[in-house]
Amino acid sequence: MGTYDDDTFQAAYDKVLAKWPADREALTLPTPFGTTYVNACGPSDAPPLLLLPGGGGATSASWFAQAAELARVRRVYAVDLIGAAGRTEASGARTVADLGDWLDALLAGLGVERADLGGHSHGAWIALHYALRAPERVRRLFLLDPTQCFAGFETAYLLRALPMLLRPTPRRVRAFLDWETGGADLDPDWLRLQEAAAGFPSGRPVTGPRPTPEALRALRARVLLIVAANSRTHDAYTVAARAGELLPRVETDVLPDVSHHALPVAAPSGVGCRLREFLV
């Protein structure tokens, strides 16, 4: 849209990556939908954990606040999504089935048969759909304030997001995040990355319906659902209640004083510990 500058974006991305553990490795893996970029850390012989960020400008770098804690017990693989800002190539993915094929290829490229899986926002939606498609490949699943999984978007959220989506600029991104997070004190380098991602020339992200109640009732994996009480994306308590009704093996935490976009980058320090305890 005339505002995106790749050098600015890459520099902002690298500044957030500098907050990751010192053993971070950058991996690039071929898939049928182009090369996927992955940030990895943790012991190479530890059980694998695949992390999917939210859409838009979130990128895999956004797991910086949780990576060190998770890497204590897992080999962490944080992925830049197809159809979103980051270092993954733009793809021809169009359907939920395409996303499943992409993750199948990604796990194969990593040499992983079965993994723990976690996601935030749109990444949580992808993670849940994949757990339903390939339950034999997902050991445990955690969802951080997942969108379009158990409840729809609030109308006010969509109306606020519309100008940013129609003509993304750094100023509109910052104003939207200030509104959704209630002016929370967010990491300044992460904020600059969100601003720098405005107008990123990515493909259209794959979206789709919520999983059916029948599919959710059949999911046997253990699930940890962490919901942001101050989320303006959806009603947090509706999300928690609906998940409790449908998922056979779900644990739900509703975090006070945090919003949707502040997860996972500005969540209380106990979040990483909670995730680690769930995984082991």
Image: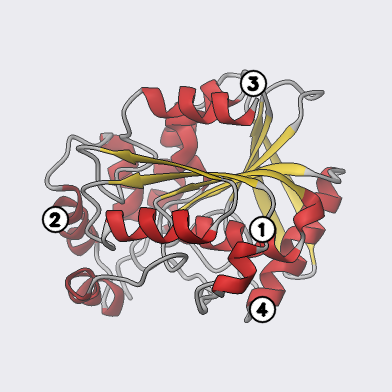
Location of the C terminus (image quadrant) = top right
Q: Which residue is mark 1?
A: 219
Name the mark nearer the viewer: 1 or 3: 1
State which tag comes first along the sequence, 1 or 2: 2
Point out which mark residue 65 bears. none
Q: Position of residue 44 (x, y in %)?
A: 78, 25
Q: Residue at x 81, y 53 (%)?
A: 136
- The one nearer the camera, 252 or 56, is 252
Residue bearing the label numbered 2: 179
Residue at point 37% right, 68% down? 151
For the residues marked 1 and 4, what is the alpha-carbon distance in whole angstroms? Answer: 29 Å
Report the coloring of the rendering: secondary structure
Left or right of residue 97: residue 260: left
Residue flagged by tag 1: what amino acid is it? Answer: Leu
Between residue 102 and residue 215, name the one nearer to us. 215
Q: Which label sits in the foreground, 3 or 2?
A: 2
Disc 4 marks which residue?
A: 92
Q: Earlier in the sequence, mark 4 or mark 3?
A: 3
- The span from disc 4 to disc 3 (Cα, nearest Å) is 32 Å
Ranked by sequence position, the earlier of labels 1 and 3 is 3
Q: Earlier in the sequence, mark 2 or mark 4?
A: 4
Tell me which numbered mark, 3 or 2, is placed earlier along the sequence: 3
The residue beneath circle 3 is 23
